[in-house]
Image: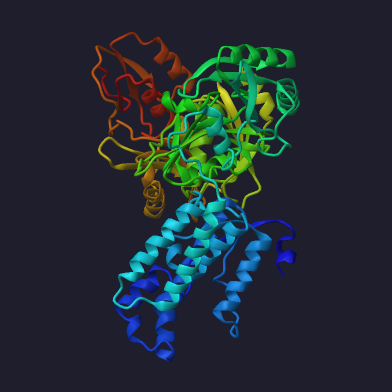
Amino acid sequence: MWLSAFGSRKVAYLSGPITTGPRFIDWWNEAGRRFDPTSEAYRSALFREVIGPNEDELKLTAELLRARDSDPIVEPASLFVREWSQQDYLELWQQFIADHASRILLMDGWEFSGGSASEFCHAHLRGIPTARIDGSPIVARDGLGAIGRALARIQTLPQPPTNLQNTLRAAYDNLEAMLPTIAYVQTGNVTRKDASLDRLAETINVAQFVSYEPKDGKPRQAYSRVLGEQPNNTFAGVAEAAKTLLERSVDGSVNVRSFTPESPLSREFIYGLTRVDDVVDAVLRLTREGLHTIINETVDIHDGGVSGVVLGSVVEFAPDDTPRAVEKAGTASLPLGWGLRLLATVYGFEPDLAVPEDTRLEFSLHPRPRGWRHTHTLGWEIAEHKGLDLPPVVQWPNRFSRMIGDKVFGLLVAHHIGLPVPWTTVINRRVAPFAFGQATGSSEAWLRTAPVEQMPGKFTTTRGWSDPFKIMQEEDPEHESIASIVGQAGVEPRYSGASIVLQSGEIATEGVRGAGDLFMQGTVKPQKLPDSILTDVKRLHVDATELGPVRFEWVHDGERPWVVQMHRGATRSSADVLVPGQAKRWAIFNASQSLEELRKLLASLEPGQGVELQGEVGLTSHIADVIRKANVPARMKPRGSKAA
């Protein structure tokens, strides 16, 4: 049956409590332990208080995940066979995991479920990744800790449920027995770079390397990790090692770095060698100086990938840089869970960043596979960091959003926090095309441009398809302003508009019946919107609470609002002041003029000048947005009022 459903394709399996879990613990402690476990009253109360609500939550979560990820999700709650025992179900799903699961997604409270704990253990015995439903990895060591904490809580109950306690204890013991075979980098007093790389390579892919230590003035091989070779394979000499690394490097290039064992800092670093003789000469010279050396494959940081750091529950990254990008301004900072899903959406592969929660990992992601395991993820350094609880600061523009386009990044964030975004295909200058979002039910396509940074109303947006390459060539011939072209599934526009958070904290939602193009351009004034539409749009703000204040453009199809553009932050505007501040002189701009004329006016302003906007225009229109981005004092006056 599984094969007929999805063939040889691997799919995600959603694991969560059904007969036990946190609901069972609460019910057992309050009332369940007073029942006879063999009685019909016990079974009836268990189904009413625990099994039914657990099954409903599993099914609902699966539906939300399918909408979010557009991928099959298999969950166990929908299968019911009257004659089966719990052991029958357990055996079926363990076999399913072994044969068909690409990864296991675990619902909150999984560690209090005997079935989920067994499935977690079974997945790790089979080498199948496990993660929370937000996508953040759970490695075996962290799972062991979670089950241990669950057991400790159960043991404090006045009358612990024996069956659950025994099942969790068995899963705990199995995981604990397995852990010695799973390598984790221990920082301790190890400072040698090559020893650290060798240990890191047991946990994650690393750039190919061969290292040498000085022995009687000559290089003696210490460690190696080379594609197609056994770990720490010994080469005949430096020349053979250099030749092999050059042949198996993606870019046909290697670096030679030198160091001393007592210092973590590099000494001389020679980049981009392509000839065997040059590599050999460099290693021999540095060895005669008493230095340790590492020959490693050159990794191109300008290949469209990113480098960064995983630290606790946060992932930070930037393109065109090393992992030290996190020490600079403009680094993207996201929660680890949906941050990894966002990266997987853009690059088309799952980042291999499953490391214990109490670690700091420096990494890089690459469109072309690299390293001794030939995958898309490279690890560079790992260290233990205990007791971290750092919240990410999600904001853009940042260096990554500039690469893929401000509009694209905002829509990706909206999609991955669960807001409805129309199915979107992105054609980027530096990254292969990718897609995300939800089907709208429309076969019409809209075309949008995604500038490097937000430039309201400047570049083309068309309802219907246009030649994207012609638009990019005509509107951005220097390849500097437009990062991507976006094809988006159309939404039947019953109402359209925009919504922002004012300086007072109030939500200002404006729009019109039908398409909102002219409203956003400021040539059509906002209309009174039905209360139901305002309520639906306000709910989008509630669903985006984790980001803080946001502003977005929306289209409502009569059933729900769709987010077609989103930016972070509140506005300083009020009903009649777009940008607070005093001006010595006010330049007049009529709302009936074009956005380009407004940009010209703003560019010509002298210090101390402000803008007085005459005519009725929405606070959420592109005209208001352009003035806010210029950050000059600006106020609104109805037509016919006297200007200062």
Query: Eyeballing the image, is 323 above or below 422?
Result: above
Query: Quadrant location of the C terminus?
Result: top left
Name which residue lies at 61% across and 28% down: 304
Residue sticking out furthest to the bottom:
39
Q: Is residue 549 visible?
A: yes
Query: Eyeballing the image, is 570 above or below 494?
Result: above
Given residues 524 and 257, the one toward you in this image is 257
Residue 493 horizontal/vertical position (percent): 53, 46
Residue 491 horizontal/vertical position (percent): 56, 47
Given residues 352 and 500, the one toward you in this image is 352
Task: State the image quarter where residue 313 is shown.
Answer: top left
Given residues 595 and 151, the one toward you in this image is 151
313 relative position to 609: left or right:
right
Residue 633 horizontal/vertical position (percent): 29, 20
Residue 61 horizontal/vertical position (percent): 50, 61
Residue sticking out furthest to the front:
216
Task: State the image quarter where residue 73 is shown.
Answer: bottom right
Query: Eyeballing the image, is 589 above or below 607?
Result: below
Q: Is residue 480 visible?
A: no
Given residues 638 and 552, the one toward you in this image is 552
Name which residue lies at 45% across and 70% down: 54
Query: Quadrant location of the N terminus?
Result: bottom right
Query: Eyeballing the image, is 31 above or below 620?
Result: below
Name which residue lies at 50% across and 66% down: 171
Colour theme: rainbow
How many badges with numbers are in the image? 0
